Image (cartoon, coloured by chain):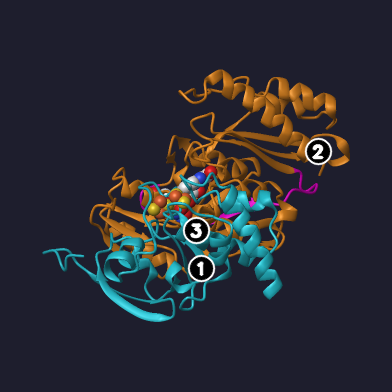
Amino acid sequence: MADAIAGVARTQVTVTVNGQERSGNVEPRTLLVHFLRDDLGLTGTHVGCDTSQCGACVVTVDGVTTKSCTKLAVQADGCSIETIEGLADGTNYHPIQDAFWEKHGLQCGYCTPGMIMSAKALLERNPDPSEAEIRHELEGNLCRCTGYQNIVKSVQYAAEKMRGAG
Amino acid sequence: MFPTSFEYHRATSVAEAVAMLGEHPDAKILAGGHSLIPAMKLRLAAPAMLVDLTRVAELKGVTLGDGVATIGAMTTYDELRFAEGIADAFPAIPEAINVIGDQQVRAHGTIGGALAHNDPAADLTAVFLALGGRVEVAGSSGPRTIDGEDLFVDLWTTSLEPDDIITRVILPLAADGARSAYRKHAHPASGYAVVGVAVAIEAAGGVVSKASIVVTGATSKPTHAAAAEAALAGKAFDADSLAAAVSIAADGLEINGDPYASEEYRSQLIKVLTRRALEAAMSR
Ligand SMILES: Cc1cc2nc3c(=O)[nH]c(=O)nc-3n(C[C@H](O)[C@H](O)[C@H](O)COP(=O)(O)OP(=O)(O)OC[C@H]3O[C@@H](n4cnc5c(N)ncnc54)[C@H](O)[C@@H]3O)c2cc1C
Ligand code: FES
Ligand code: FES
């Protein structure tokens, strides 16, 4: 992002992203998603809408599931953020990532990072959700490709694997 | 898109936030941000300053005692619905919150923000009114209490002054147990209420001593279905009185129509949802 436009006050923001401390200088109006993508280069978090309705931008902030397009970067100062990039350990994928692969839970992949981050928040609260609960909790994540069937199957598969592992 | 430029101030206390609003007439409170930030992204709102309340600890938390529930304005939907005692005392609250927006909206939206914003299709505004709630407010003219009946004025308009902050929401505990319920028909795209109906019934000894039925989505502000309330008052709370109330639930209301849902369709939904909500309350 262009540095310091004349006359616009910037604030230093320091966050811990996926365990690493990162900082940058932002205008108050910088949305968290733009800070992650443009300043920190974490482009796995997507932007799919202007209206806070699509969920492509979902991350967690201090453990709370968050649309990063609906939070200001300055609000996240001092917080711990987890993005899609933080889930895999090298090529060792998170069980939810594996499940989306196994069950064909994606086509173009645009919605997938947000979908996986929302699924993770859901499974942390409810490790054994019903199909209806999965659909209800993922209402804020829109997918224009899959028709959702395989996304639901992926989350069910991940839940089963994660219960088995736990 | 991103908002127009503004100054940002993170408040640490109510007093500080009130002072900031007093000094900066163009400033706005930032609560959960799930109405304000989308509006700013679309540039429907362009405040010169945001006073962020998210880290004001004194505005958080829920306590039950002395015949009331006291809810900090910055308590999020999720914190409220899972707070100890809330679901038992006010079953309508978790019912309504469960159908607000999505996982992320429920994690960030606040009760204070919902009431101050007064969206005509919001859910918790109707529940708050049906439960006989009031708000405590801090402002340059000192603290005061506004009864729910005086809070909502019109579409997105309340009786709050520009430098007023809702600090607490007070809900009286029903003398006769918790017979409240909320039913909603959600717009398939936005998730907001096409029509929502909140009911709270007190019927000690089987006779209705207090009937509150509040409609949202269909009207410019949350509005009592006064005809249906009158039909229940003093009657036995049974299938007959329920049917009588339902048949006139939309009477006397100024119902809005739009290309998605006509006035007639919304009137019908008011009846259907009033019946479902009253049946749920009766079963409690
Ligand atoms: C995708 C999406 C779907 C949604 N679906 C629904 C739905 O189905 N039903 C529903 O009811 N809502 C829905 N909402 C709106 C959501 O409930 C909002 O969070 C809520 O209306 C506003 O609360 P907030 O804390 O986010 O307030 P903010 O957006 O921060 O503020 C809203 C307004 O209230 C003012 N304000 C906030 N707090 C105070 C206070 N304590 N004192 C004085 N003024 C204050 C602000 O200055 C601002 O003008 C949805 C939102 C989104 C993004
Ligand atoms: S980008 Fe669409 S909800 Fe955040
Ligand atoms: S896979 Fe293409 S939008 Fe979901």
Residue at figure coordinates x 66%, y 44% from the top left: B131
**Percent coordinates x, y for residue A27 in the rendering:** 24, 64
Q: Which residues are magenta?
A: B161-179
**Label 2 lies in what chain?**
B
What amino acid is labelled 3 in the image? His
Residue at figure coordinates x 57%, y 55% from the top left: B77
Nearer the observer, disc 2 or disc 1?
2
Local secondary structure at mark 1: helix
For the colour orange, the matching chain is B
> Gap between marks 3 and 1, in whole Å?
17 Å
Q: Can you say whether B203 is above or below B95 in the image? A: above
User: Which colour denotes chain A?
Assistant: cyan
> Gap between marks 2 and 3, in whole Å?
32 Å
Q: Earlier in the sequence, mark 3 or mark 1?
A: 1
For the residue carrying disc 2, how many other residues have a C-alpha within 10 Å: few (<14), some (14-19), or many (20+)? some
Residue at figure coordinates x 41%, y 54% from the top left: A110
Nearer the observer, disc 2 or disc 3?
3
